[in-house]
Image (tube, helix red, strand yellow):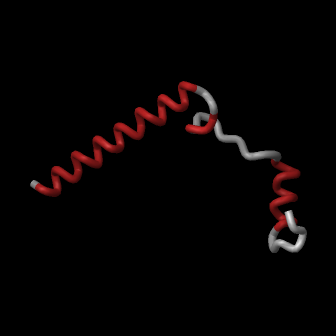
Amino acid sequence: MNEKVKGHFHWKALFFFYGPATVDNALHGGSTEAREQWKRHWAERKRLAAEERAARRS
């Protein structure tokens, strides 16, 4: 990365102290259980949104 990029030092320092970002139980987390949980959650959100739209139309 170009050293002249504004704020580069701060990101470099954060990465040095904290290491790479990791996300547990996320879609890209890699576990099959996490992906299935995300799919169930997404389906539930779609269902609730459809119910809310139907209620507003009534």
Q: Quadrant of residue 5?
A: bottom right
The residue positioned 88% from the left and 51% from the top of the image is: 16
The spot of residue 26 in percent (x, y) is: 58, 38
The residue positioned 87% from the left and 67% from the top of the image is: 2
The residue positioned 44% from the left and 34% from the top of the image is: 39
Mark count: 0
The spot of residue 18 in percent (x, y) is: 81, 48
Look at the picture and state if 9 lies above or below 31. below
Q: Quadrant of the C terminus?
A: bottom left
Side of 1 relative to 47 (left or right): right
Look at the picture and state if 36 lies above or below 23. above
The spot of residue 24 in percent (x, y) is: 64, 36
Q: Residue furthest front?
A: 2
Q: Residue furthest left?
A: 58
Side of 30 relative to 35 (left or right): right
The residue positioned 55% from the left and 31% from the top of the image is: 34
Q: Quadrant of residue 1?
A: bottom right
Side of 10 relative to 26 (left or right): right
Side of 11 relative to 53 (left or right): right
The spot of residue 7 in percent (x, y) is: 81, 70
